[in-house]
């Protein structure tokens, strides 16, 4: 009887992508920053929102679908990622108590990546699907964030 369970082919059913409920923005301070953010959206298909936080409550750039809050207010998750200089990946945002921290993203954002850029700045990405980002995507985000950090204006 137990042998039958061992021969079952079980596959995890992926969640469907959702249409993010928000407003489209294209606010970038320079062509280089615009290129970097557009490159992230192009290279990482399930990323639909990109925001650059400049520290001190400043939002430096927004591209893609955004939520109700107009400015980034750094919460515990964003602060910790910037302090530690480590990428934070929240694969299923809807089940986490920290989701309220990301009010600048659409309310139905499914996943978030926070990529520190140094000097109290960070790139925040919102995804339209639960567990949408692969290891390749996360590496690509790091690489593009490195370029982005060099092209941002001084804060």
Image: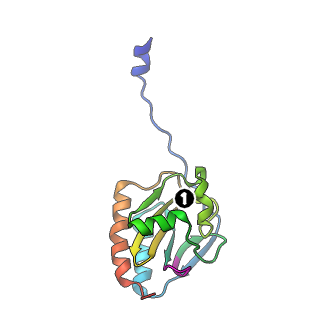
The spot of residue 1 in percent (x, y) is 45, 11
Give percent across and percent down for residue 4.
43, 16
Label 1: state its secondary structure: loop
Q: Report the number of discs.
A: 1
Residue 145 picture quarter: bottom left
Left or right: 141, with 60 as reference point: left
Q: Is residue 14 above or below residue 94?
A: above
Q: Would you say residue 118 sits in the magenta stretch? A: no
Rendering colour mode: rainbow
Which range is magenta? 54-62
Label 1 crowd (10 A; few <14 / some 14-19 / many >=20): many
**At 64% from the left edge and 68% from the top edge, which residue is drawn?**
22
Q: Is residue 96 left or right of residue 3?
A: right
Residue at the (35%, 72%) spot, across then down: 144
Quadrant assignment, res 88: bottom left
Between 80 and 66, which is closer to the camera in this rendering? 80
Q: At 32% from the left edge and 69% from the top edge, which residue is drawn?
A: 143
Residue 116: x and y in percent read 41, 70
Q: Does any portion of residue 105 appear in the rendered image?
A: yes
- In terms of image quadrants, where is residue 142? bottom left
The residue tagged 1 is: 128
Front residue of 118 and 127: 118
Q: Position of residue 40 (x, y in %)?
A: 41, 70
Residue 61: within the magenta? yes
């Amino acid at each position: 009887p137990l042998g039958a369970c061992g021969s079952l082919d079980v596959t995890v059913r992926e969640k469907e992508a959702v249409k993010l409920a928000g407003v489209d923005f294209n606010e970038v301070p320079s062509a280089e920053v615009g290129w970097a953010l557009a490159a992230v959206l192009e290279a990482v298909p399930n990323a639909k929102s990109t925001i650059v936080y400049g520290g001190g409550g400043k939002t430096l750039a927004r591209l893609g679908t955004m939520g109700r809050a107009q400015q980034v207010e750094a919460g515990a998750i964003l602060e910790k990622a910037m302090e530690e200089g480590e990428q934070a990946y929240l694969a299923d945002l809807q089940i986490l108590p920290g989701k309220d921290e990301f009010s600048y993203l659409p309310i139905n954002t499914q996943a978030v990546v926070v990529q520190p850029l140094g000097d109290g700045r960070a790139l925040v990405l919102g995804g339209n699907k639960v567990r949408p980002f692969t290891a390749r995507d996360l590496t690509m985000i790091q690489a593009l964030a490195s370029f982005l950090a060099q092209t941002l204006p001084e804060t």
